[in-house]
Image: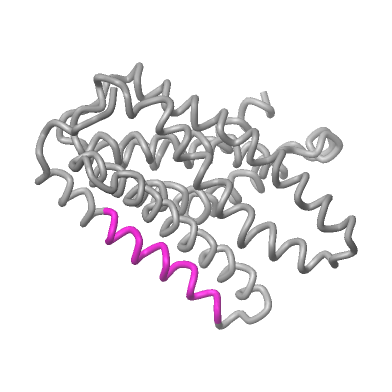
Amino acid sequence: MQLLYFIIFAIFPSFLWLIFFLKEDPRPEPKKTILKVFFYGVLSAIPVILIGVLVSIAMRSIGLNDYIVTLVSIVFVAAITEEIAKYCALKHSALKSSECDEPPDIMIYAITAAMGFAAFENLLFLLPDKEVLLISPNIYLKTVFAESIIRFASGTFLHALTSGIIGYFVAISMMTTKHRKKIVIIGLLLAMLLHGLYNLSIIAGKENESLFVIAPTILIMLFIVIFYCFSKTRKMTSICKLEK
């Protein structure tokens, strides 16, 4: 029973944000397609984790200290690989679907893929220690619940926002036959930059508490931008020029 509670606490931040952003779609997407995209997002986390582990091992093997390894892994490797993985999940699960026929749909599916990714990431991040769970399960579950609340307002939220940015640029690219790839790449680079800056602000905040304000500031600004992007996509041509 404790394991079930752990799973629920770990994945509920993703489902809460997913439910929240689904309301931004004037014409709700089929639940079957949403689940498919979410599952692709879950799968996309696996290669990211493997790459992260391999890069960390490689950096340590050449003698880099733990601080440098952590800095490079979180600020650069994680930001780059995670945004690419979430985009790939979006691309292969939704972009060529007949259900993805309006600009807001692309942002919704991008965020859905991100929430699948975040759900798997949270499961690993909050993975229980077997001994701790057996000795004091109630205390551990309270800790997991508290940490999941923090994840809801931080890491999971960030994934939704940066993927929303990618979705917006993909939507723009679908409205033209020129420079389509360049527009998508710009969106990816912007998401990576914002993700990396957020991660860097978290690390900096641990060194200097006065810098902790940077991370929530980034989230708030991105949140505002995402709603602006949704309003823009709702004014675009109803049928996207998707490549079949």
Give the image location of residue 47, x and y in percent: 65, 35
**Of residues 19 and 133, the one drawn nearer to the viewer in this rendering:** 19
**Membership of 221 in magenta stretch:** yes
**Membership of 36 in magenta stretch:** no
Looking at the picture, the colour scheme in use is one colour
Quadrant of the snapshot with the C terminus: top left
Which residue is rendered at x = 39% and y = 35% of the image?
112
| Chief SS of the magenta region | helix
**Of residues 5 and 31, the one drawn nearer to the viewer in this rendering:** 31
Which range is magenta?
211-226
- Specify the quadrant of the image occupied by residue 90: top left
- Specify the quadrant of the image occupied by residue 226: bottom left
Q: Is residue 148 left or right of residue 73?
A: left
Which residue is rendered at x = 15% and y = 35% of the image?
26
Is residue 164 placed above or below 116 in the rendered structure?
A: below
Quadrant of the snapshot with the N terminus: top right
- Specify the quadrant of the image occupied by residue 74: bottom right
Give the image location of residue 48, x and y in percent: 63, 41
Give the image location of residue 92, x and y in percent: 43, 27
Instruction: Give the farthest residue toward the front.
Output: 178
Which residue is rendered at x = 32% and y = 51% of the image?
183
Which residue is rendered at x = 90% and y = 64% of the image?
63
**Of residues 106 and 241, the one drawn nearer to the viewer in this rendering:** 241
Q: Is residue 182 left or right of residue 29?
A: right
Give the image location of residue 29, x and y in percent: 25, 25
